[in-house]
Image (cartoon, rainbow, N blue to C red):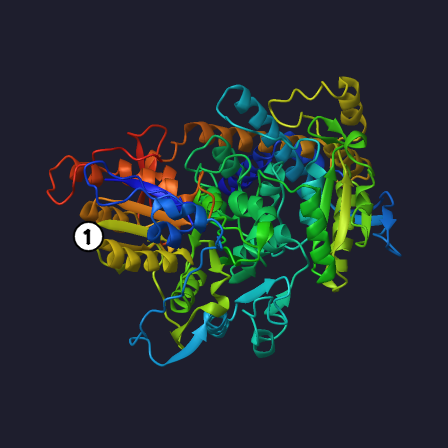
Amino acid sequence: MKKMLAAAVSRVLSRVAQKPASRVLVASCNYSNDAMFEIKKCDLYRLEEGPPVTTVLTREDGLKYYRMMQTIRRMELKADQLYKQKFIRGFCHLCDGQEACCVGLEAGINPTDHVITSYRAHGLCYTRGLSVRSILAELTGRRGGCAKGKGGSMHMYVKNFYGGNGIVGAQGQIAEAFNMAALWKLPCVFICENNLYGMGTAAERAAASTDYYKRGHFIPGLRVDGMDVLCVREATKFAADYCRSEKGPIVMELQTYRYHGHSMSDPGISYRTRQEIQNVRSKSDPIMLLKDRMVNSKLATIEEFKEIDVEVRKEIDDAAHFAITDPEPPLEELGHHIYCDNEPFEVRGSSQWIKFKSLS
Amino acid sequence: MAAFAATAGGLLRLRAAGSEGQWRRLRGAGLLRGLLQPESATGVAAQRRRVAHFTFQPDPEPREYGQTQKMNLFQAITSALDNSLAKDPTAVIFGEDVAFGGVFRCTVGLRDKYGKDRVFNTPLCEQGIVGFGIGIAVTGATAIAEIQFADYIFPAFDQIVNEAAKYRYRSGDLFNCGSLTIRAPWGCVGHGALYHSQSPEAFFAHCPGIKVVVPRSPFQAKGLLLSCIEDKNPCIFFEPKILYRAAVEQVPVEPYNVPLSQAEVIQEGSDVTLVAWGTQVHVIREVAAMAQEKLGVSCEVIDLRTILPWDVDTVCKSVIKTGRLLISHEAPLTGGFASEISSTVQRSRAIQRAVTGRHPVCRVPSTLPDA
């Protein structure tokens, strides 16, 4: 009898001891499973109706979006740090501030949809399925990277995600793409992440019309608040449904902001003020917006978010450690995959005595 | 050994190798006149027609590929495309005006046979055509794009060089656009002027990752085009437009392949190696015949066929044998592909070994050529 009691008590005590104090508190808090939020109405072009102005967010989804956005934010900041420590070389374009765009996009489409983007791609790489490890290792050019260390920041690919492209189309190429998509009614969503600056030039100084959602001309468009992940999600769902019902292409402009400069070689303050960046950070930061919403409507507590932050930080630190310690790809691989199914041939290196074999 | 390049339809200047004395110093416009007329008659010659002409020389009927049919170049192309669309259910043909049959009739009948989803027109946008083709190829389908004239390929240059050629390399072999083939009518036609006559193969030769192919005849064209379509690298296939109707040969009806990156020695010889591709092959064949008849010179004629990657071994082996090299192409001289061939041959270890006398078959040159 005494033994059984002792065993029971020890079991209860051990269970209590395993739970951290915060968990115990949460267990006693009354949180809801989902909540309805109002979201900003989208500006419409050539459309009768737009995405809904209210949406339901479940606790599970909310925590997932928060975790994804926080992971992307931490990953970009870690990339910044690694770049300054010269572990990452070459070009590095960071998307912190624009997390809601990629997370909201992924929330609105299916994993089997195909996505392609330009060079500010790390966030989309993550949401499309690449692990932080493989992204950071690709940035540092190691063999554990998603493109085996040969692609770098702008050339990351995974199934149904065609990069990461360093070369981006000019206005002529976009015009041709719009024309073909509209002519053949291709189910294509053209997304413009309008972060107000084209490298160092403000949009008003480069574009005759900054209503980018109208630039599809004969293609309908909508302008979306790109700092609100729920707004992006609803707009993406709307756009995807529009295309899936064979109505043709659609243009989506996401109004967003990037905290860093265009790339790591751009300080980002020579064409805009620190005050402006600080304003956006304090008023419209996407992660802060989501967290505040969820806490205020009792979907989750601050402690839970702090826990997620800790876990994310650990994940990023592990990934960064891997990215620094993984070996570089063997030099012999430098010439591979220029051609396919070809006889192996020699590729000259940086001097006439250095030769690489190109295998396919 | 004298190695140099010549431009077709223009001036040909042969520099006499000092001690040889076998070649006369020749000046004048036009290949034929230059070889036939002595110097004093150049003034009279200048009044005559200055356009070089050629005669298409068909190859003997091939026996090893089954039943053959008389076809000209565009019919051979249509036959190759027909075979491709029949064999590969993902193959699609697109370009400007291809639906009704194409401005050179290369796609006649294909839309009726295979449907409007597989043979369709694009808007007037070369950049868009190639970009669209790259997209199709990346998803795995076979894309056969037509650029209406090679002169118009330049808006698509960025897509070809920056996207198509580098897709496989930059994605670590995860994605590729190897099933893309771009076809374009190429070369002089007599009345084409600035924008219907260009030969841009040299621009693309500077770009690793793509293949560039130029056939000389209907039989070669069908086999090479089928090889390009089946090749797992993006290919550009230039079709000499003057041969579309002028070249008539017996061509097998069934599909067959002519290998890429292999030059063909059309005629063996011992005194000089002549290299050309496309229409110019027929010009130099004529030259070889005339040289044999008038000057007693035995020429080895090589059709390069694939410009990139080109068959270095065949050309070098031939030059080791003969000791002299002449390359002829329609494109402008400076930066033309002949300069690449010429410099590679001169730099080649095999040639250098031969020239230093370790191989007794090659003669030591007494003058260095002007490039």
For the C terminus of chain B, the image quarter is: top left
Residue at coordinates 81% horizontally, 31% vertically from top-left? Answer: A204
Q: Position of residue A273 (x, y in %)?
A: 77, 18
Residue at coordinates 59% horizontally, 59% vertically from top-left? Answer: B148
For the N terminus of chain B, the image quarter is: top left
Residue A46 appears left or right of A57: right
The residue indicated by pointer 1 is B270
Residue at coordinates 44% horizontally, 68% vertically from top-left? Answer: B247
Given the image, what chain letter belongs to the residue carrying mark 1? B
Q: How many circles with numbers are drawn on the protein?
A: 1
Element at badge 1?
loop
Please tell me whether residue A275 is drawn above or below residue A50 in the rendered image.
Answer: above
Frontmost residue, B151 versus B313: B151
Residue A250 appears left or right of A49: left
| The quarter of the displayed image where residue B254 is located | bottom left
**Residue farthest toward the bottom in the current orientation of the protein:** B67
Residue B93 appears left or right of B275: right
Using the rendered image of the protein, determine whether residue B10 is visible from the camera's viewpoint: no
Frontmost residue, B126 versus A224: B126
| The quarter of the displayed image where residue B278 is located | bottom left
Q: Around disc 1, counting alpha carbons within 10 Å, would you say few (fewer than 14), some (14 to 19), or many (20 or more)?
A: some
Frontmost residue, A237 versus A115: A115
Q: Amino acid at mark 1?
A: Ser
Q: Position of residue A322 (x, y in %)?
A: 45, 31
Q: Position of residue A348 (x, y in %)?
A: 34, 35
Q: Position of residue B325 (x, y in %)?
A: 28, 45
Using the rendered image of the protein, determine whether residue A207 is visible from the camera's viewpoint: yes
| The quarter of the displayed image where residue A285 is located | top right
Please tell me whether residue A95 is drawn above or below residue B133 in the rendered image.
Answer: above
Residue at coordinates 82% horizontally, 44% vertically from top-left? Answer: A223
Frontmost residue, B103 versus B209: B103
